[in-house]
Amino acid sequence: MKKIKPKQKRYFLKRSRRELRNKKRQGKSRALRQSTSGLISQNHSFSFTDLRTPSIFKLQYEYCEDVIGFINKIKALGRSGKHMNIIMDDISDIGEGAISMLLSVMEELVRNGVVFTGTKPKDSSSKAILEKSGFFKFVNGKVDESNSKSKNTILNTGDNNTPQSELAVEIVKSMETVWGQKGRSPSIYSCVFEMMRNACDHAFKKDNQIRWHFALSHSDSENTVKFSFVDNGKGIIKTFTEGILKNFLNLFTDNVDIMETAFENGIDSRTGLSWRGKGLPTIYENYSDSHIKNLVVISNNVYIDFDRNIRHKLKNAFSGTYYYWKVDQTCVKECFEIKR
């Protein structure tokens, strides 16, 4: 056997140590990816920062400041690399929109290596809403047998090429809940499509950053479906003011005025320019025509509830865009037969 020189020996020793360190890192990385797949992480050796949710976890006007403030705390801790324990014990009332917003920010941080653990609400009604929402399709955690069968769901995407068939299927299901028959609804489809398009075209800098979540919550007893759509992009106001509006801001009173104009009249109504982003007026037109109701939009530091005539500047700004609306039998019926 050829004798190894001292210099070679030192080289091989360094290389073996380096390979061992790399293997440990890879193992840790795999463990991290496995554990970050869920809110309820079973096996972990990380230190966690406790975050207690607001007791009323809804995005209605009266409660949205507390919820968005909580969401912003998660984002800030996540940016600093902190792992978090989301404590939901005290929730007494919860909404599907807030669930979607929480899920969207969690998934964004998980992709950057943040790990989450957490608890469920002790209140049985809130726990049932959470378990039926579709939240646990994306996170680890057991769902009670009584809540495991539900038409409620949350759809999400990671790119511009998401198949539209899944969206169409869920809208057909929603028509069955509201009108008792399966059918197409071009108005609802066009609303969601415009929200998706705005997220993909304007909200993110790169295609691989695109993420949105679309939640549907069914009530068979009330013939009602609630919808919420959320993305964690730049937000409507920031998109406009950094783009076509940066030279026309003197035409608007404030951010509330910008958003209201964008929905109700279209940005080109004041600038005189041909604005290609017609998506927001399309959404508002479907609301005005009563195909949808209870339209709420939160983006950057603006909150608008069109039904309640609330236009409010938020203290806690949301970096992204959130939409909420619902369809019930007081809406104009739009349920077209599916052609085979």
Image (cartoon, rainbow, N blue to C red):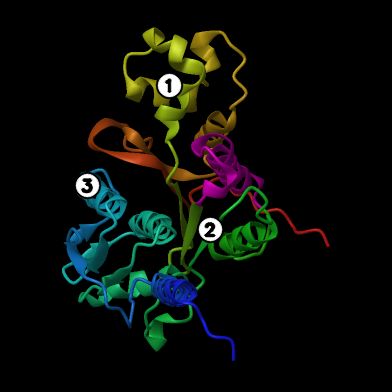
Image quadrant occupied by the N terminus: bottom right
Specify whether residue 330 is painted magenta: no
**Labelled pair 3, 2 in contact (Cβ < 8 Å):** no
Q: Is residue 318 left or right of residue 224?
A: left
| In this view, 26 is above or below 215 | below
Specify whether residue 202 is painted magenta: yes
* Residue 157 figure quarter: bottom right
Residue type pointed to by label 3: Gly
The answer to whether one can see residue 282 in this image is yes
Identity of the residue drawn at 21% across and 70% down: 47
Packing grade of label 2 (10 A; few <14, some 14-19, many >=20) is: some
Residue type pointed to by label 1: Thr
Residue type pointed to by label 2: Asn
Identity of the residue drawn at 18% across and 58% down: 54
Label 2: which residue?
Answer: 156
Q: Secondary structure at mark 3?
A: helix
| In this view, 320 is above or below 36 | above
Among numbered discs 2 and 1, the one appearing first in the sequence: 2
Label 3: which residue?
Answer: 69
Q: Residue furthest right?
A: 340
Question: Which stretch is magenta?
Answer: 185-211
Residue 241: which numbered mark, if any? 1
